[in-house]
């Protein structure tokens, strides 16, 4: 109950700050609750504050980019199926609405059937993904769906070895395309392998530590599969950590769960992280893969998104 009272108190502060166009009061409240370590000199203001398209549940590009702009995000990681959306159409809408495209994530990345789940086929699929990222003009493309292509491996260790080999081969392909690749640790409810930062680092090292491969952490996934939520940030470090995803312990916006975001923010500052910060919020009524949302749910999604974005901005400016 105390957590809910604190959330609603902070919500009122954030709403007031938003209405006034001034977050200084809210930032002061945050600083009073959990003081930022002023000795840390890294400039977190360089973070790109983005969101991820699948969470909106909107197929129409105009609706999607319009809603991204309404919330106040500056950038978007696009997840539309490359076999459905023409790259030039996505690029055109991003320019029309003034939303930067940061990266591409092929959300639908499973093989059509179990027989297709091989190393060779996974590499062939992700080469198409990389080519689409090039067509979008984005600097980064994701790889975490590779774990779905390990169905025919006889052990978990062999599955990890297949993923590492695929990452190695794809990094060589992406090098010529001038595309950065990223791999995210996702919880066991979403992917078969690479569910924590330890496995994530194992994949990276056994792929040969390619310079054009970076790693991604997600607060929601960390809350499920990590022993604590600070060590993974410090173990990966700011140079290797390319993107950090924000959603609370129940996948909703900041304050709807139990994650200590001031501690997360401080840890990111400490390691010098200043890259892609993605809000990946899903409201309680619309768990992943249960979209689209109705009007009432969209309104709640927008509310939680604006609130979370303003909390992060307040921490950045404190």
Image (cartoon, rainbow, N blue to C red):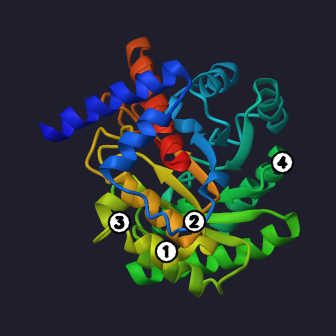
Please name the residue that numbered disc 4 is placed on. 137
**Looking at the rendering, which quadrant does residue 208 occupy?**
bottom right
Q: Work out whether 263 lies above or below 207.
A: above
Q: Work out whether 210 lies above or below 146.
A: below
Q: What kind of element bears circle 1?
A: helix
- Tag 2–tag 1 contact (CB < 8 Å): yes
Which numbered marker is on residue 200?
A: 1
Q: CA distance from mark 3 to mark 2?
A: 18 Å
Does 227 sit left or right of 231 as displayed? left
Q: What kind of element bears circle 4?
A: loop
Q: Work out whether 223 lies above or below 169.
A: above
Q: CA distance from mark 1 to mark 4?
A: 26 Å
x%, y% of residue 183? 57, 65
Q: Is residue 54 visible?
A: yes
Count neighbours of disc 2 (C-alpha within 10 A) and say few if under 14, some if 14 to 19, many if 20 or more.
Answer: many
Does 176 sit left or right of 264 as displayed? right
> Which residue extends farthest right?
176
Which numbered marker is on residue 229?
A: 3
């Amino acid at each position: 109950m105390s957590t809910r009272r604190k959330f609603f108190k902070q919500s009122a502060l954030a709403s007031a700050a938003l209405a006034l166009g001034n977050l200084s009061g809210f930032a002061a409240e945050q600083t009073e609750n959990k003081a930022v370590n002023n000795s840390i000199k890294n400039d977190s203001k360089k973070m790109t504050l983005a969101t991820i398209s699948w969470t909106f549940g909107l197929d129409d590009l105009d609706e999607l980019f319009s809603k991204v702009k309404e919330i106040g995000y500056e950038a978007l990681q696009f997840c539309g199926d490359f076999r459905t959306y023409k790259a030039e159409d996505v690029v055109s809408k991003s320019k029309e609405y003034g939303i930067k495209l940061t990266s591409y994530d092929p959300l639908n990345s499973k093989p059509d059937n179990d027989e297709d789940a091989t190393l060779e086929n996974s590499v062939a699929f992700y080469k198409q993904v990389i080519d689409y990222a090039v067509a979008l003009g984005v600097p980064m493309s994701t790889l975490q769906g590779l774990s779905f292509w390990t169905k025919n491996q006889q052990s978990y260790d062999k599955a990890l070895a297949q993923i590492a080999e695929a990452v190695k081969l794809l990094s060589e392909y992406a090098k010529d395309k001038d595309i950065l690749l990223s791999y995210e640790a996702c919880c066991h409810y979403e992917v078969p392998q690479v569910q924590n930062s330890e496995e994530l680092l194992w994949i990276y090292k056994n792929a040969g530590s390619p310079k054009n491969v970076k790693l991604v952490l997600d607060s929601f996934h960390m809350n499920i599969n990590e022993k604590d939520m600070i060590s993974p940030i410090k173990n990966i470090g700011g140079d290797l950590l390319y993107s950090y995803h924000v959603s609370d312990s129940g996948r909703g916006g900041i304050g709807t769960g139990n994650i200590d975001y001031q501690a997360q923010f401080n840890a990111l500052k400490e390691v010098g992280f200043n890259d892609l910060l993605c809000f990946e919020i899903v409201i309680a009524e619309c768990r992943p893969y249960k979209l689209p949302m109705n009007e009432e749910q969209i309104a709640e999604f927008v509310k939680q998104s604006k609130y979370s974005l303003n909390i992060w901005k307040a921490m950045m400016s404190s």
